[in-house]
Image: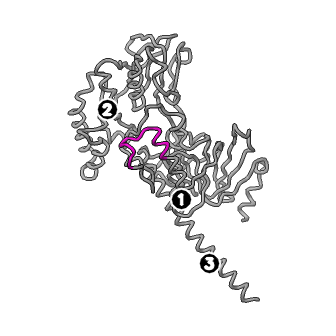
Amino acid sequence: MENIFRLADNRDFFNRRCVLINGPIIVGAGPSGLATAACLKEQGVPFVVLERADCIASLWQKRTYDRLKLHLPKQFCQLPKMPFPEDFPEYPTKKQFIQYLESYATRFDIKPQFNECVQSARYDETSGFWRVKTVSSNSASGVKPDAEYICRWLIVATGENAESVIPDIEGLGDFSGDIVHASEYKSGEKYRGKKVLVVGCGNSGMELSLDLCNHNALPSMVIRSSVHVLPREVFGRSTFELAVLMMAWLPLWLVDKIMLFLSWLVVGSIEKYGLKRPAMGPLELKNKMGKTPVLDIGALDKIKSGEIKVVPGIKRFCGGQVELVNGEKLDVDSVLLATGYRSNVPCWLQEGEFFSKNGFPKAPFPQGWKGNAGLYAVGFTRRGLSGASSDAMRIAEDIGKVWKQETRQHKKRTTACHRRCISQL
């Protein structure tokens, strides 16, 4: 209790609504935060979830395109303690996945505190607690007082994709057409008949280019570096599932060679279409660099037919044109930035031992889930939803052990005190 009072020795402490949390704080109500909350619930540990948006899984609900589906089979994307409904397809749609997450939150009685944007979080060495400051706003009820939460454990669940990445390209700000990040793109309907430059050739860039084709737009996709493109399925089986099965018995380098051979059998050579494969295999590249291979669902056929034009890197934008590194100039109506996302942890977490400057834990998988002084990270493994689920279970078990041990000790002290009081009567 003495440590709690030490926190009050600060002017800002009295200018904010102060809340003492009996348990951990989870920052983020996406799949990672929900998974951790559910696992803590199973351990009997109370918690508070802070979410800056007004809904769970805001990335999925507000910053994804309409045609999006899970890229992996549903059994590799389910959260702990609750599988997908049996009647869901192998690759659930965006709408179905959001429905699953909402059912998940309801089942485990997870009620995040929405519109709570974490401004800063730091560990107070004097008191031994984390101090989490938030700025709260709610369009329905106006601006609420800023708050400071005091907790023993802090779980960072803001994930790998918290903020959009906007590339620094000469002349981009002066481009006369529309510039849209993939997070704002919904469908290709508004681009019908337009020349669209898609910057980025990951899964999003490929799928948005395909969607544009399906809406009779004219996409050109910028590919400035090498990329692995694999079929989503090989002879009716999920490519990812086959890789997982083989990795249980074979070394990674051999699995990579087999996957590339199977890919060649299904889609043929891709180099002649302007797609150069990296020297490192797809699984090794994912493990070492965090770069996910593209799982093709139809874009490759459009590239082969010429409906999606592949172009090299960009040199500069000039008015309504783009100049490429090979000197070619293209007339462009719109630019679609499929340039990815980044972690925002360095913006608010005042800590330099566990997280690196890029917003990811310094320790490689599988050690990157636990730091010092009650700090945890979930969803930063670059291994998708299965990696987040693994983190969530480890974190909940780790905190649960301490919680249960201290709860038993508290009950023993309470019982002993009660017996002494009775004996004195």
- Mark 2 crowd level (few <14, some 14–19, many ≥20, 10 Å Cα): many
- Hey, which quadrant is residue 273 in on the image? top left
Q: Quadrant of the C terminus?
A: bottom right
Question: Label 2's element?
Answer: strand
Q: Residues within 10 Å of mark 1 (few under 14, many from 20)?
A: many
Q: Which residue is mark 2?
A: 229
Residue 422, position in %: x, y?
Answer: 72, 86
What residue is drawn where x is 53% and y is 40%? 357
Residue labelled with disc 1: 40
- N-term-proximal mark, 1 vs 3: 1
For the residue marked with disc 2, what is the amino acid? Val
Residue 89 on the magenta span: yes
Residue in the picture at 30% in, 42% down: 238
Q: Nearer the viewer, mark 1 or mark 3?
A: 1
Q: Secondary structure at mark 1?
A: helix
- Residue beneath label 3, please? 412
User: Which amino acid type is shown beneath numbered disc 1?
Assistant: Leu
